[in-house]
Image (tube, rainbow, N blue to C red):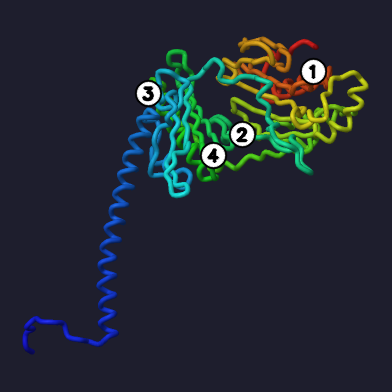
């Protein structure tokens, strides 16, 4: 065989030449595409590195940055909020929070949307919980459509206990984890971190990620403050909590006391006929129940109320001012520092052994295994007038059952109206 002497390539036919040309073009395209892909990978890697640094700095190094970036399908570009008060969490100024925004593509443009928030508390904390009748459970700024009732669903699911409640609570978008100090440090007995998905309703997997993030943050915050802790165990599943109210006489969990109350009464007129509760927990620091009167039921009794001289409101009030009651149980660090916000007036603290009514707010107090407890109830505007003395009966039934179930002593109830 003679060696090649160079020169033009042999003509192998039209089709083979075309194939060779396509292969060459594909090779060149592959190199170009591979270069862009490599550049894109490098850029994404750089974005992720910058985001990790931003998350650590904004949230005081309390979080696993990758855990935050994996939320909402994954985000490479994350940075602190532009709101000055939320740009950086300060452990020396608790309660404090950091809020993160993430880059997303919309209509070919990059926009920055709120992605995640972390808030940290050192307990006890004054004003951690506030009983405020203006914080209603229902969204009233909507128009009723056929077959709908504003009291059919609460605007947000109620906080439910994490497992037996000792670890904390979770709701639709937020998981709060509390870690107790083995010994109090500088008057602080526990630390709490709340991780919130700000992009919408998280999946079950993302709720677990939020729980993990909250636990990590609470433990790190406590340890940096000199508080030795034992990290709490988290449940394996955090099922979504419902928002729909059901028949009050079938109330379960934190509303089971009201179902029992109704069974003992022959006259239920004006009383709530719908309820929504959460599972009860042996060690939880907080517990909630929402009760409401169906709008159609309210329509049926409206004329009788007017005849009795009760200010029952006009027709539109059925949707803009629904009639509801909401109960609150706070025990231990959750009870300490609880305040009330009456419909008119300033925040007022609650001391051990106190009980009071302040317009649309009522509360009782007790001691549960040596820890303080507050049992409160808020009432919708005008509904207290509609219920009259029945409101006292409902509240007494609630506070008595909650205190008994938790093994509390020394229950103090407010006097009759």
The percent position of residue 371, horizontal first and vertical second, equals 59, 17
> Are the residues at dot 2 and dot 4 in contact (C-beta closer than 8 Å)?
no
How many C-alpha atoms fall within 10 Å of the one at disc 1: few (<14), some, or many (≥20)? some
Is residue 371 visible in the rendered image? The answer is: no
Badge number at residue 392: 1
Residue density around tag 2, few if under 14, some if 14–19, many if 20 or more, within 10 Å? many
Q: Residue furthest bottom?
A: 1
Q: CA distance from mark 3 to mark 4?
A: 26 Å
- Of callouts 2 and 1, the N-terminal one: 2
Q: Position of residue 174 (x, y in %)?
A: 54, 34
> Where is 7 relative to 178, above or below?
below
Find residue 363 and report its horizontal and vertical position in percent.
Answer: 69, 16
**Inter-mark Cα distance, 3 to 1:** 46 Å
- For mark 4, what is the residue? 235
Task: Work out whether mark 1 precedes mark 4 in sequence or the reverse, and give the earlier one.
Answer: 4
> Circle 3 sits in a helix, a strand or a loop, which is it?
helix
Where 110 falls versus 347 (above or below)? below
Which corner quadrant holds the N terminus?
bottom left
The residue at the point 61 percent across, 21 percent down is 331
Q: Is residue 307 toward the left or the right of residue 70 in the image?
A: right
Please tell me whether mark 1 sits on a helix, a strand or a loop.
helix
Identify the mark at residue 224; answer none if there is no mark. Answer: 3
Left or right, residue 269 beside residue 92? right
Q: Is residue 409 left or right of residue 64?
A: right
Percent coordinates x, y for residue 89 in the rendering: 41, 25
Per the model, the C-alpha gap separating discs 2 and 1 is 27 Å
Q: Which residue is mark 2?
A: 160
């Amino acid at each position: 065989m003679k060696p090649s002497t160079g020169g033009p390539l042999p003509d192998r036919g039209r089709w083979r030449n075309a194939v060779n040309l396509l292969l060459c073009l594909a090779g060149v395209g592959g190199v170009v595409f591979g270069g862009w892909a490599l550049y894109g990978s490098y850029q994404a890697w750089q974005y992720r590195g910058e985001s990790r640094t931003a998350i650590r700095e904004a949230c005081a190094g309390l979080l696993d940055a990758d855990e935050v970036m994996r939320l909402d399908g994954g985000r490479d570009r994350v940075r602190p909020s532009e709101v000055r008060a939320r740009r950086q969490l300060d452990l020396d100024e608790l309660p404090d929070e950091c809020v993160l925004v993430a880059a997303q593509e919309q209509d070919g443009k990059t926009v920055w949307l709120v992605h995640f928030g972390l808030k940290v508390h050192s307990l006890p904390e004054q004003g951690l919980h506030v009983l405020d009748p203006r914080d209603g459970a229902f969204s009233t700024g909507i128009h009723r459509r056929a077959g709908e009732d504003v009291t059919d669903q609460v605007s947000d699911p109620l906080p439910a206990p994490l497992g037996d409640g000792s670890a904390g609570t979770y709701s639709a978008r937020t998981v709060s984890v509390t870690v107790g100090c083995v010994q109090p440090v500088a008057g602080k007995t526990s630390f709490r971190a709340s991780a919130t998905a700000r992009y919408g309703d998280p999946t079950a997997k993302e709720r677990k990620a939020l729980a993990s993030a909250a636990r990590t943050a609470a433990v790190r915050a406590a340890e940096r403050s000199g508080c030795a802790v034992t990290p709490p165990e988290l449940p394996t599943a955090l099922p979504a909590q419902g928002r729909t109210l059901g028949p009050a006489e079938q109330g379960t969990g934190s509303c089971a006391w009201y179902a029992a109350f109704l069974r003992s009464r022959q006259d239920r007129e004006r009383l709530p006929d719908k309820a929504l509760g959460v599972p009860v927990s042996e060690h939880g620091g907080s517990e909630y129940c929402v009760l409401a009167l169906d709008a159609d039921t309210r329509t049926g009794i409206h004329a009788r109320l007017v005849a009795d001289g009760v200010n029952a409101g006009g027709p539109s009030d059925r949707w803009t001012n629904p009639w509801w009651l909401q109960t609150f149980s706070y025990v231990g660090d959750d009870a300490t520092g609880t305040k009330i916000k009456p419909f008119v007036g300033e925040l007022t603290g609650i001391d051990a052994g106190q009980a009071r009514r302040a317009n649309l707010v009522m509360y009782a107090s007790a001691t549960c295994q040596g820890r303080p407890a507050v049992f409160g109830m808020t009432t919708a505007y005008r509904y207290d007038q509609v219920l009259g003395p029945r409101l006292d009966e409902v509240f007494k039934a609630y506070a008595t059952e909650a205190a008994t179930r938790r093994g509390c002593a020394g229950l103090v109830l407010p006097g009759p109206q």
